[in-house]
Amino acid sequence: MNIIEFESKDQLGKEAAAVIARTIAAKPDAVLGLATGGTPIETYKELIQLHQANQLSFKQTKTINLDEYAGLNPEHENSYMTYMKRHLFDHIDLPHDQYFLPNGNAAHLEKECLRYDQLIEDVGGIDLQLLGIGQNGHIGFNEPGTPFNSKTHVVQLDENTRQANARYFSSIDEVPTHAITMGIASILSSKKILLLASGKSKAKVIQYLEQAEIHPDFPASALKLHEDVTVLIDREAGSLR
C-alpha cells in the first residue's frame, strides 16, 4: 500500500484524475470502478475539465459503481445514479449504455446482486477501482464485520453511516436503511485500487489504516491483501500520521 500526501484537496483531486486519465490513455476501453460521496467530487471536476479540453474521451470506457441505496428510484434526487449524472456522466462523452450502478429499486434485491456480479465478470473485471473510506473503515457500504470473501450483497446501513449521509437528505429519517454494495472480494478483484481521503475527519481512520492488522472489524484493512493499492490523502487527512 502506497500512501501519497498532498498539500490540498484540490491537488489530491488533480492527481486522482491524472491516474484515471493515464489508465484510459493506456487502455481506452478500460473498466473504471467509481465511488460517490464528498471526496471524489474534485476528481470528477478535473475529469470533466480534461474532457472539455479535448484531452480525455470516455467513448470506449465502461464504468461500474460501488453501490446504490435500496428503495430509491434511480431518478430520486439523492440516488447515486443522480449523483453520478450530476457530477460526471452528464458532462462527458460516456455512452448511456456503458455506465452501470446497482438497481436499488429492483423487485428482488438478491437477484440484482447476482446480476451485478455477473455484469462485472462479463465486462472483464475492473481495471481501476476508485474508493473513499468511512470513519469506521467502511469501503463501499461494507461495514465492520463484513466477510472478506463477500460479493455484491444487500446491507443494512450502520447508524453512523446513515448519520454521515444525512446531510444530503432533509432529515436522517429519509436516509435509506439498506443499500446494495459490491463486496470486499469484488473490490479486491480489481486490478488496481485508488483510495482517496481528505479532511480532518479522516485523520484517525487514515492513521488506523496504516497501523491496523488485517481484520474484518476494519474493512479497509482488506486492501493490504491487494498488490496494487495507492492511497491519496491531503495534509489534513494525514495530520495524525
Image: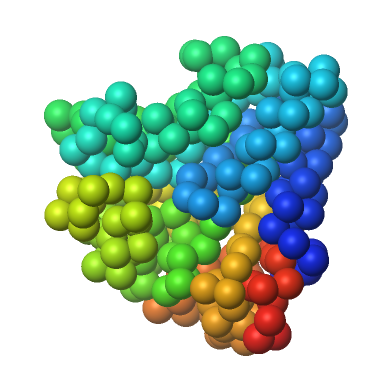
Q: Is residue 1 above or below residue 64?
A: below
> Residue 215 or 197: which is nearer the viewer?
197
Residue 138 visible in this rendered orientation of the protein: yes
Residue at 21% across / 57% down in the picture? 172
> Residue 11 or 144: which is nearer the viewer?
11
Q: Which residue sits furthest front? A: 170
Residue at 49% across / 29% down in the picture? 86
The coloring applied to the image is rainbow
Residue 124 visible in this rendered orientation of the protein: no
Q: Is residue 63 above or below residue 172?
A: above
Residue at 29% across / 43% down in the picture? 69
The x and y percentages for residue 75 are: 30, 24
Q: On the picture, is 103 further left or further right than 183?
A: left
Q: Quadrant of the C terminus?
A: bottom right
Q: Quadrant of residue 83?
A: top left
Numbered-mark total: 0
The x and y percentages for residue 215 are: 47, 79
The x and y percentages for residue 196 are: 63, 58
The x and y percentages for residue 78 are: 32, 38
Q: Quadrant of residue 82?
A: top left
> Residue 171 or 145: which is nearer the viewer?
171
Residue at 67% across / 73% down in the picture? 236
Q: Is residue 120 above or below residue 92?
A: below
Q: Quadrant of the N terminus?
A: bottom right
Q: Quadrant of residue 17?
A: top right
Q: On the picture, is 88 further left or further right than 15?
A: left
